[in-house]
Image: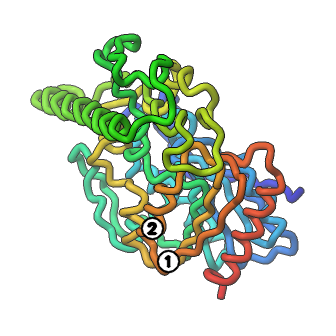
């Protein structure tokens, strides 16, 4: 095991009361864990980061360092709590990590977009190459400038979700008939009441997907109306919180013939019905602004569309037994990067490679080999 360096970086303040910690609001900081190779060689380093997950203990840190690639697991200011998460603000946090590694002497920097970090890595590099994020999705200025985001030299996508807005569109439970009542249900769209056998009919799946999008559109319409109402008063608040119940309902969790891969039935987080009704789940607690930035059709952080705007080489690590990324997800990434992309199948790999140390080693080998050939050539 290589020693771990604790990294502490000051970042630009965000919105008012972004954190309940006065220390964090007055002196915002982000934190990371850096593992470097033996021998002091500082040729190439990788950052693995997620908009909200804690990656300071990520499974790739030690294996990549053992293969000669420094790796930093970097946390955003929203680690563990995406209630107020603004994707545009996370760009600044990732930029701080890139600058840190450059200042430490690393000649090449690669972003490893694992899980929900894939869309973040793509968003970052797209903005670093062709800056356009002058405003948040709600219309307020970001105060970002092109020079704030130093570009990197390559992107690795691993068990890569295509973006939070795409994910919520595929996971929202369309059986919700009252946004204020977590139990109010239209049985026609309830995947978990046991009345529909798998495999589901294609007509049902198409109608289910349309109903999911319709629910997202209703939420988005309400969010925009609430913003207009609040901002009509110059002295009024700029934002408010709200709850979105039941955000974990995808026919692919139950029907393994849909977007078929090697996955087992269920959710990557356990019983999908329990996750769907859970008090703490993806997209559960939001603000108007964070919903638009992360989860809405107006989000600027779509993974494949941003990846298409980049020019750097891309490695796609496809976990074939992942229950949250599917052949259609990989296809979207391939279509975005085309001949810049190399794909490696991690056969039998679940989403987190949990209990699969041999596949962690395989992944680290593939990443190290690709970085040596495509980035450090």
- Residue 255 appears anywhere in the view: yes
Protein image colouring: rainbow
Residue at the location (32% across, 14% down)? 180
Residue at the location (27% across, 58% down)? 134
| Circle 2 residues within 10 Å: few <14, some 14–19, many ≥20 | many
Residue 310 lies, in percent from the top left, at 42, 73
In the drawing, does residue 220 fall left or right of residue 243? Answer: left
Q: Secondary structure at mark 1?
A: loop
Q: Is residue 309 above or below residue 34?
A: below
User: Which-is-in-front pick, marks 1 and 2?
Assistant: 1
Residue at the location (46% across, 18% down)? 195
| Circle 1 residues within 10 Å: few <14, some 14–19, many ≥20 | many
| Residue underneath mark 1 | 312
157 and 171: which is toward the camera: 171
355 and 149: which is toward the camera: 355
Q: Secondary structure at mark 2?
A: helix
Tell which residue pokes out farthest to the right in this image: 1
- Residue 289 appears anywhere in the view: no
In the drawing, does residue 311 fall left or right of residue 5? Answer: left
Quarter of the figure with the N terminus: bottom right
251 and 277: which is toward the camera: 251
Quarter of the figure with the C terminus: bottom right
Distance of label 1 from label 2 (alpha carbons): 9 Å
Asked whether the residues under the numbered discs 1 and 2 touch, taking CB atoms below 8 Å apart as contact, a structural biologist would say yes
Residue 252 lies, in percent from the top left, at 50, 39
Residue at the location (75% across, 57% down)? 61
Marker disc for residue 125: 2
**Quadrant in the picture for residue 309:** bottom left
């Amino acid at each position: 095991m290589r020693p771990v360096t604790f990294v502490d970086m000051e970042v630009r303040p965000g919105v008012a009361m972004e954190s309940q910690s006065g220390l964090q609001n007055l002196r915002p900081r982000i934190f990371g864990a850096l593992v470097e190779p033996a021998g002091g060689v500082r040729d190439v380093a990788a950052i693995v980061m997620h908009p909200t997950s804690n990656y300071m203990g990520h499974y790739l840190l030690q294996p990549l360092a053992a293969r000669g690639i420094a790796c930093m697991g970097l946390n955003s200011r929203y680690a563990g709590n995406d209630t107020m998460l603004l994707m545009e603000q996370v760009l600044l946090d990732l930029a701080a990590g890139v600058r840190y590694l450059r200042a430490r002497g690393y000649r090449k920097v690669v972003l490893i977009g694992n899980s929900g970090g894939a869309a973040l890595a793509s968003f970052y590099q797209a903005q670093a190459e062709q800056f356009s994020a002058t405003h948040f999705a709600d219309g307020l200025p970001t105060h970002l400038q092109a020079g704030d985001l130093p570009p990197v030299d390559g992107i690795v996508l691993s068990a890569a979700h295509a973006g939070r807005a795409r994910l919520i569109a595929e996971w929202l439970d369309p059986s919700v008939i009252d946004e204020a009542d977590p139990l109010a249900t239209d049985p026609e769209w309830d995947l978990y009441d046991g009345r529909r056998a798998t495999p589901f009919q294609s007509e049902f799946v198409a109608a289910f997907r349309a109903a999911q999008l319709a629910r997202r559109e209703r939420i988005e319409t309400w969010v925009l109306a609430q913003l207009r109402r609040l901002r009509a008063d110059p002295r009024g608040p700029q934002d408010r919180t709200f709850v979105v119940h039941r955000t974990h309902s995808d026919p692919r969790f139950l029907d393994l013939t849909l977007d078929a891969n090697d996955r087992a039935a269920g959710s990557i987080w356990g019983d999908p019905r329990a996750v769907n009704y859970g008090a703490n789940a993806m997209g559960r607690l939001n603000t108007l602004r964070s919903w638009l930035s992360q989860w809405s059709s107006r989000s600027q952080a779509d993974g494949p569309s941003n990846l298409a705007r980049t020019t750097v080489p891309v490695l796609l690590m496809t976990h074939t037994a992942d229950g949250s990324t599917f052949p259609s997800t990989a296809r979207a990434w391939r279509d975005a990067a085309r001949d810049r992309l190399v794909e490696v199948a991690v056969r039998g790999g679940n989403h987190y490679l949990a209990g699969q140390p041999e596949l962690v080693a395989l992944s680290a080998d593939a990443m190290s080999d690709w970085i040596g050939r495509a980035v450090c050539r």
